[in-house]
Image: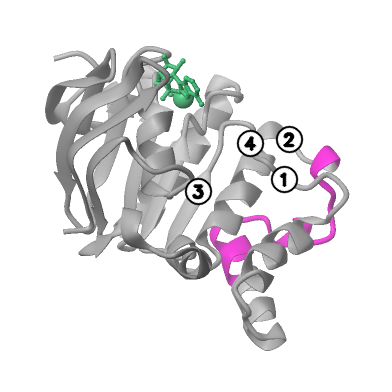
Amino acid sequence: MALSFKNVSMLYGSVYAIKDITFDIDEGEFVFLVGPSGAGKTTILKLLFRQDKPTSGVIEFFGLDVNRIRNGGLPFFRREIGFVYQDFKLLQKRTVYENIALALEVTNRSNAFIKDAVASVLDMVELKDKNNSFPYQLSGGEKQRVAIARAMANSPRLLIADEPTGNLDPGMQWDIIQLLNKINNYGTTVLMATHASDVVDSMQKRVIALNGGMIIRDSKGGYEV
Ligand code: ADP
Ligand code: MG
């Protein structure tokens, strides 16, 4: 099992962001997390990445109890998970190379390892020639490809993407989806939150649908049943 949520709830004040969420994802799966704005998608991804701890319930990542990881262990845990955001979160004053290398430096990799790893992920996203470019010199789609390269630099076991196509033109959106699909085909488990129904319809993958913090559907297919 790559990950599992067991009866997980998250209360903000007196409001449940998610309520009694239970699901398992196997290694190698590609899963869409769908639902309207406010449904609880980002909350699930944040809890999985241990940016917060749930009010109740258990979250496991390859058998590891995520909520029991001590602070000193968090960087090592987090390098097993790549995170891709809607707004890319690239450092504007750093080059493409530096943006990716920094993700590796925080986990104490050697310089030789970093150089090889950056070249390899830039090759994967087909942006080798943008090594020395700054984010402002890139299109939206290219920025997101850099962000995906950064997320993959530590060869994570899981790639999480939170509305990764939300800021992109429809044409660019398909490039990103194809790239995530390629990464999944190479063996990385992918969990993608989205409300892009056309993307979900075309992929015909497993869909976990949320509404009001609860799972209302978990099955293979399009955005709607
Ligand atoms: P989604 O990503 O599906 O749009 P979220 O997980 O961001 O949904 O939010 C789910 C619910 O939890 C929303 O009602 C939101 O307002 C609330 N929420 C999320 N984060 C916080 C927070 N840090 N403080 C208070 N309420 C929050
Ligand atoms: Mg969200």
- Give SS at disc 1: loop
Eye-nearest disc, 1 or 2:
1
- Could you say where residue 77 lies in the image, as x and y percent from the top left? 43, 65
- Could you say where residue 107 lies in the image, as x and y percent from the top left? 59, 73
Which residue, given by chain and number where applicable, does mark 2 sit on?
Answer: 139
Nearer-N-terminus badge (3/1) = 3
How packed is label 3: few (under 14 Cα within 10 Å), some, or many (20 or more)? many
The answer, for residue 204, to whether it is visible in the render is yes
Q: Which residues are magenta?
A: 120-136
Which residue, given by chain and number where applicable, does mark 3 sit on?
Answer: 83
Q: CA distance from mark 3 to mark 1?
A: 12 Å
Residue 142: quadrant of the picture: top right
- Could you say where residue 82 lies in the image, as x and y percent from the top left? 48, 55
Amino acid type indicated by mark 4: Gly
Which residue, given by chain and number where applicable, does mark 1 sit on?
Answer: 90
Amino acid type indicated by mark 3: Phe
- Give SS at disc 2: loop
- Residue at (52%, 29%) from the top-left corner? 165
The answer, for residue 125, to whether it is visible in the render is no
Mark 1 and mark 3 in contact (Cβ < 8 Å)?
no
